Amino acid sequence: MAHLVSVTTLLPSVTTAQEAAAPLPPSTSDQVVVTGQVLPPAEAPRSATCEALVRDGHFQALLTTARGGDLLGPQILQSTRSPRNPDWAAAPLSPPGSPLPELGEQRFGLSPTDARGLQGGLVSGPDGAPLSIETVANNRDQAIALCRKIYQRGDFAPTYTATQIQLEGELVSGPGGISSPGRNMLVRRDTTLPMAFALFDLGRYEESLDWFRRAERRLQPAEGGEEAALFIGKINLLAPGEWADREEGIRWLKRTATSPYSPIDDMPRFDPDRPGWNTAVGEAAIILGNLYRSGFGDIPADPEEARRWFDKALDVGHLPAAQILGDMCFAGEGGRRDVPRAVRFYRRVAEFGLPTAQYALGQILEFGDDRVEPDQPEALRWYREAARASHPGAMFALAVAYDRGAGVPVDRVLATGFYKEAALQGHAGAMAALGTSFYTGDGVAQDHPVARQWFAQAAGLGDVDGMVNLAVMAARGEGGAPDRVAAWRLLHSASQRRHERAPTVLAALEAQMSPEERRAAASAMH
């Protein structure tokens, strides 16, 4: 029996080869770990702002004013929260019109601040010594220490006075931004917003809409009014029922997204582990951007309008919007294709630790694109940063680099380690490449049954190299029972997906198949 034509070895199962850039200096570690230059962690760019702040005249003026009174300092970062995105079509958890739910003590729409630990108007520095207003206003190092201490608390620092520090619980600004015990008590006793969210979480959207309207009339934006306005828009736009008014929903979302915003007082914090967390203002802008990007119901897609709302989301501090804008600039959505601008957007959020942006930036810099020159050392650096967050595409890219010696020394053991990590996270190309490693015994012990299993998993996810390699092994009976009919189906599918070598291998297989096998293969396609 003749052997299959041109299939003496398996296909490489990696991306198309590119010209390698100048290699990086040899690594100091041979371990199967993600290595490379350490970029600033996600918090570093923000906490590094402290050094800039204390050199800023406006910030110095604030500190000088604080010394004259009893202010502790300006607000730094706003808290974010996870968006509520229910299954709008699901049945409510309690019947509409049934008794109202009992309320807990926690309010959704107001970020509580913790005044405990600020007794007497003092905050401890890194060495445990108290930082007084007098010390901070006269000592740049102490000002930086106080600023960094605020970041380390993981929340934002409101403006306190010594009198307010003696109050327990939440501190709430009254009219004109002035906090008052009376206003604070009013907001603490408010039940409109908590009841609105309780009904919303039960799926009783029409009832919750009425409570959100009450909350929006009762509360100022910073007290939860923005949250109420956001959900008036979301419910009208997305909830089922004839009572919902889509046009009103869009009006409320636009009203929320265009609320007054101060980059000093309202800048939200960003956690790369929770990129979807947002403020009410930022979430409204993102919803509008998504609505106009893809269209919704009778609202046609408008990519230019979508870009404007994603720009707005970024302007109000929602950093993941930069990833979306980078994607749109790269693809030419809502305007001409602009790769350099996409790189700027990706870099803006990649520096804050978002793995998807780090990987996208690495992809462009590895191969180069329109008006962007290849820079493989920097591409590898971004891949390593994304791989530290277990991004499967980045780990696969590093595996390919070490497999081929593209910008780094060839290291098949290290490449196999990256292939395995990416494969275990569901990366189809890494599964196919890992199958090749087990088939050839390169970097691991040769094991044809295991190789066939990895090819099968890759093929099941639509990887064409996995399909062809699995077909070759099935036709030969390697790593399992021979099955030419299954091999034919795999090669036929890979050919339809325009795999370069699949038609040649398919023709060679057909020449070896019996009439019964051909009929079985043909019937399987109907």
Image (cartoon, helix red, strand yellow):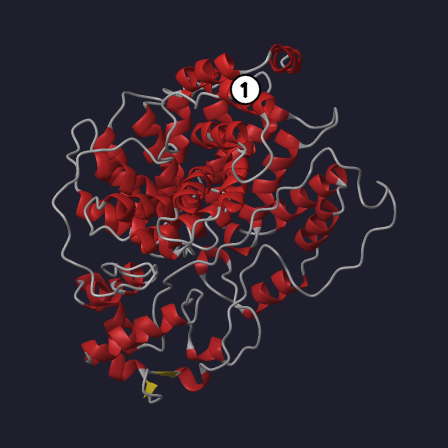
| Residue 120 picture quarter | bottom left
Residue 522 lies, in percent from the top left, at: 62, 11
| Element type where label 1 sits in the image | helix
Q: Is residue 159 above or below residue 190?
A: below
The residue depicted at 29 percent of the width and 63 percent of the height is 44
- Mark count: 1
Which residue was labeled with disc 1?
488
Residue 287 lies, in percent from the top left, at: 51, 35
Q: Is residue 168 above or below residue 272?
A: below
Q: Amino acid at mark 1?
A: Trp
Residue 409 lies, in percent from the top left, at: 20, 52
Q: Residue furthest front?
A: 1
Left-right relation of 139 to 279: left
The answer to whether residue 380 shows anywhere in this view is yes
Q: Nearer the viewer, residue 448 or 197?
A: 448
Left-right relation of 271 to 372: right
The residue depicted at 75 percent of the width and 42 percent of the height is 203
Q: Is residue 178 above or below residue 234?
A: below
